[in-house]
Amino acid sequence: MFISLTVGSLDYSAISPFSQRMTLLIAVADLYFLLLEGIHSGKPLAHGRNGFYFGENGEYVNYDLSKAVSEALYSKGKVKSTTPTAFTEDEMAKYYPGTLFFGANSRCKAERSRAIGWNPKKGDPEFLASVKEEVPN
C-alpha cells in the first residue's frame, strides 16, 4: 500500500479478491510462550515437516485495510477523501518500477497452534480499528 499525500488520497494498486490472514503481535507472543512451555515440560509437540505453528486469527481483504487507512488519514486531515483509489500506470512505474501489480496473497490456518491451546482473543475488527491509532497526527 502506498499513501500519496500529494494528491490527497490513499492509493492502492487493486482491490484484491484474495484475503490475508492476520493476528496481533501479542497473540503471537502467547503462541511462542505455549511452544516454549511445551518444549520445556517435555510435552510432545510436532516438529520437522509437521512442526509449523501458524499464528492467525482472521482474514481481511486488502481493500478493507486500504479503506481503514484512508478513513484514518481523512479523520486527521491528511487526505481529501475516505475512498481509496487505484494506482495509475504512471504511478506504478514511478513507485514500483518493473512491477505490474502490488499485493500478495498468503493464507494459512492456525489449526496446530489451536490444538496446543492457543486461543487469540482479537481478530479482524480490532485489527482494522487499530489502524487509526497508528496514523500520526
Image (cartoon, rainbow, N blue to C red):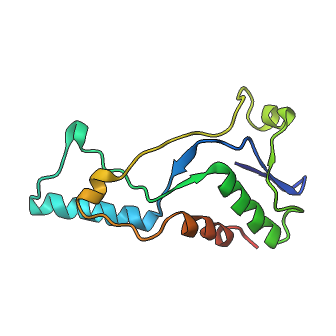
| Up/down of 78 relative to 113, above or below | below
Q: Is residue 56 above or below residue 123?
A: above
Task: Tell me the quarter of the picture where residue 92 sits.
Answer: top right
Please provide percent x and percent y for residue 94. 81, 35
> Residue 115: x percent and y percent?
24, 57
Q: Quadrant of residue 10?
A: bottom right
Query: Farthest top residue?
Result: 98
Left or right, residue 89 beside residue 126: right
Q: Quadrant of residue 82?
A: bottom right
Q: Residue at x 11, y 53 (%)?
A: 44
Position of residue 131 in the picture relative to residue 84 (left or right): left
Q: Up-down: is 14 above or below 45?
A: above
Left or right position of 53 against 105: left
Q: Is 31 left or right of 43, judged from the image as shown?
A: right
Single out the residue that lies furthest toward the left: 42
As rendered, which of 39 and 66 lies closer to the eye? 66
